[in-house]
Image (cartoon, rainbow, N blue to C red):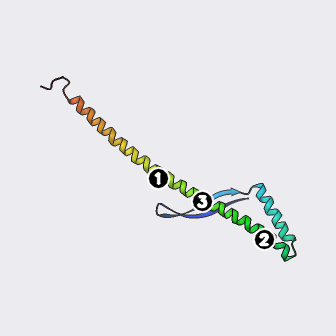
Amino acid sequence: MQFSIPVQFSYNGENYMAAMGPFEHSTEREFALTVNRRAIDECDDLRALKPVAKNLLEGWSSMQTAVQSLMMENIQLRQALAQRDNDMKAAEDLLREASEIVEQYDRQSRRAKRSLWPW
């Protein structure tokens, strides 16, 4: 079973809506869901249902924490990549400027007289 998680985030001052995924339930996750569904279906006593509900609630809470951590990590990675791109562009501009200065100096030195004494 595949599913996606809708995500709304702010990046570089703009709001975006994206989908994380698609994800697939692992066989272990499917087994846990099946076991808990069966426990709920077979339960006739409210006292017996409480531990199952608490177990599901704790599992859901852990999954939410993991998803939030992954989303934050993803956003931070995107911001780091954007900063790296900006830094690379600035470095490229500096190299281009330095290259132009070196070429200008080279042209000036070629035009200069080659003799030891300028007169």
- Kind of residue at badge 1: Gln
Q: According to the image, label 1 marks what residue?
A: 83
Query: Residue drawn 59% across and 63% down?
Result: 7
Q: Distance of mark 1 from mark 3, alpha carbons?
A: 18 Å
Secondary structure found at label 2: helix
The first of marks 1 and 2 along the sequence is: 2
- Horizontally, is 54 left or right of 107 in the view? right
Front in this rendered view, residue 41 or 117: 117
Residue 25 quadrant? bottom right
Position in image of residue 117 (x %, y %): 15, 24
Query: Residue drawn 54% across and 56% down?
Result: 76
Position in image of residue 87 (x %, y %): 43, 49
Q: Distance of mark 3 from mark 2, alpha carbons?
A: 27 Å
Secondary structure found at label 1: helix
| Mark 2 nearby-residue class (10 Å; few <14, some 14–19, many ≥20) | some
Q: According to the image, label 3 marks what residue?
A: 71
The first of marks 1 and 3 along the sequence is: 3
- Kind of residue at badge 2: Ala
Front in this rendered view, residue 115 or 15: 115
Q: Distance of mark 1 from mark 2, alpha carbons?
A: 45 Å
